[in-house]
Amino acid sequence: MFNKMLHHPFARVLAGVFGAFMMATGINLFVIPQGLYSGGMLGLSQVLRTLLQDYLHLNTPFDLSGALYLALNVPLFALAWHSLGRAFLIRTVVCTVANSLFLSVIPVPSAPIVEDMLTSCLIGGILVGAACGLILTCGCSTGGLDILGLYLSKKGARFTVGRFSLGFNAVLYLACLVLFNATTAIYSAIYNVFSSLFLDRLHQQNIVVQVLIFTKDKHQELSEFITRKLNRGVTYWDGHGGYTGDNVRVLCVCLSKYEIEALQRAVHETDPHAFFIVQEGVHIGGNFIRDLS
């Protein structure tokens, strides 16, 4: 049901906006009241907000980090146009603007809802990580390091989005250590780890599966669907049923969990009597594309 909804463009955007709301809620209710900082471009925006408030005494009736985050993303949208395509850019702009708006309008409690800082890190990490996973699964993004990291990774073969994000956050939390204190830096890093863990668990494009399809249909419809529609490679060979002795064709393909339902529909339409085996969590090396669209 959820995957079917995500194949409708308008539903994907709505789900992405809901993810942006959930993300802003987790940050404003559990992260900011503890004086902690997110990772990535949003974390940089929060640090800039604190510096503007402390040194320039710039106080606003709303949290300034949302507006700063949107401003920092504006020049990155040009990179998204060339790196991610027009459709992804439109969804990214919508979700980024929505996220910035929610960060500005959702009130930040004057005192932490949960006094224990580690518990706040865990709850905030769960909410933000789940929200980011939903946003990316919808083919959307809230901008920031997703855009910049992808652009830089295309410039150099050894440069990856993960490495860039890790390096950026290391510098950011080192700045928190220098500007603020060790407690703020350490617990901010802990929150970021929780958030990243839940993001990886819920982001379906990160879950790689291997599918074996057993069919008596010898036509190329399934192979063409996999290569043209899913943009995946497929290997097939001829086999024999051990019980029936019938000739069968076995197709093997590796893809993300997000693409499973589309493949299942194609298999059912092509050969209603076919069956398949799905194995999650396989390790993939080499030329395997993680499709974010």
Image: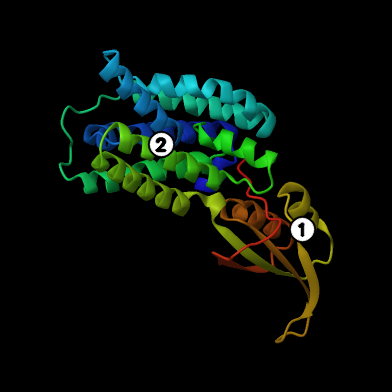
Q: How many marks?
A: 2
- Element assignment for label 1: helix
Q: Nearer the viewer, residue 169 or 223?
A: 169
Q: Which residue is mark 2?
A: 172
**Colour scheme shown:** rainbow
**Residue found at x 48% / y 19%:** 71
Q: Nearer the viewer, residue 138 or 93?
A: 93
Q: Is residue 288 above or below residue 75?
A: below
Q: Is residue 86 left or right of residue 208?
A: right
**Residue found at x 49% / y 28%:** 95
Tell me the amino acid under the disc marked 2: Leu
Q: Which residue is mark 1?
A: 222
Q: Is residue 132 left or right of residue 84?
A: left
Q: Nearer the viewer, residue 108 or 174?
A: 174
Q: Is residue 198 left or right of residue 8?
A: left
| Crowd tier of the residue under label 2, counting other residues whose Cα lies within 10 Å: few below 14, some 14–19, many 20 or above | many
Q: In x, y percent, where is residue 170?
A: 43, 43
